[in-house]
Image (tube, grey):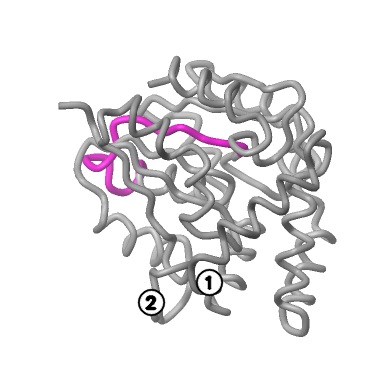
């Protein structure tokens, strides 16, 4: 039997985002597909003493069968890598969707500028809904169908409960601080990737740096896509995933 494909969403989202491509993925994987809410998002209500990548990933790993293929979008990609590192029996392959082992910009690394993440953290306190909406706009930036993409994302997300405050704050801290590059460079689990060339959150330059860290890393770049390639360029994305699977 084919290994289960587990779908993990990004920051501020929930498993509803995958509904755009889940039927096609189920067809590819003989109905062996499961989308999960990250702890504190959607229907996965939880109380963690501290919302860290370790605590949240440990909780999440309990819902994953051994030898699963983890497909993580954005923040979900960090969760996928972390689970592969700490609970390797659970993971046979990682597919990163618009995701890197380290999201923050540094001198030697292309990523999200510090002031962008800091602004999100500050705005979360007073304007939660607006902050998530702004984040949605950044995700679609550069895509030809940006307005439609945002509309579709909002509609899918509204089917499930809003994220918990600590999951939003903790998620931003994970994006700012958690650096999995050392693990990425010597990971024994196969890692594949699909990216959008116009992505404002995962700069195109970061992909070459990832390949330099791990020459076994194979990836595809969708030229006209941004941070949500499975929504803006569904057919191209599915074609890439089909070859990866």
* Residue 162 to residue 11: above or below: below
So how many labels did they put on this image?
A: 2
Residue 167: mark in rendering: 1
Q: Nearer the viewer, residue 80 or 108?
A: 80
Q: Earlier in the sequence, mark 2 or mark 1?
A: 2
The residue stretch that appears in magenta: 84-98
Mark 2 and mark 1: Cα distance apart in space: 9 Å
Residue 197 place in picture, x, y as percent: 75, 27
Q: Which residue is mark 2?
A: 46
Q: Are marks 2 and 1 in contact (CB under 8 Å)?
A: yes
Residue 218 place in picture, x, y as percent: 52, 18
At 44% from the left and 27% from the top, the residue drawn is: 191
At 25% from the left and 29% from the top, the residue drawn is: 30
When asked about the image quadrant of residue 130, the answer is: bottom right
Q: Nearer the viewer, residue 175 or 27?
A: 27
Determine the secondary structure under disc 2: loop
55 relative to 128 in the view: left or right: left
At 35% from the left and 30% from the top, the residue drawn is: 93
167 relative to 58 in the view: left or right: right
* Residue 104 to residue 30: above or below: below
Quarter occupied by the C terminus: top left
């Amino acid at each position: 039997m084919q290994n289960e494909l587990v779908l993990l969403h990004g920051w501020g989202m929930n498993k509803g985002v995958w509904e755009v491509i889940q039927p096609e993925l189920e067809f590819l994987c003989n109905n062996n597909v499961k989308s999960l809410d990250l702890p504190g998002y959607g229907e996965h209500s939880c109380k963690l003493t501290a919302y860290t990548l370790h605590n949240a990933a440990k909780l999440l790993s309990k819902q994953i069968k051994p030898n699963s293929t983890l497909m993580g979008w954005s923040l979900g990609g960090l969760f996928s890598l972390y689970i592969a590192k700490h609970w390797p029996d659970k993971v046979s392959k990682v597919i990163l969707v618009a995701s890197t082992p380290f999201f923050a910009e540094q001198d030697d690394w292309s990523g999200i500028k510090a002031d962008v993440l800091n602004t999100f953290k500050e705005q979360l306190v007073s304007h939660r809904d607006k902050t998530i909406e702004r984040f949605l706009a950044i995700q679609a930036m550069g895509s030809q169908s940006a307005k439609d993409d945002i509309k579709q994302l909002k509609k899918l997300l509204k089917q499930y409960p809003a994220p918990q405050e600590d999951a939003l704050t903790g998620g931003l801290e994970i994006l700012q601080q958690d650096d999995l590059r050392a693990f990425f460079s010597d990971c024994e689990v196969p890692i594949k990737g699909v990216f959008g060339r116009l992505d404002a959150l995962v700069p195109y330059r970061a992909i070459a740096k990832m390949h330099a860290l791990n020459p076994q890393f194979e990836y595809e770049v969708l030229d006209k896509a941004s941070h949500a390639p499975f929504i803006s360029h569904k057919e191209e994305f599915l074609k890439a995933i089909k070859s990866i699977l």
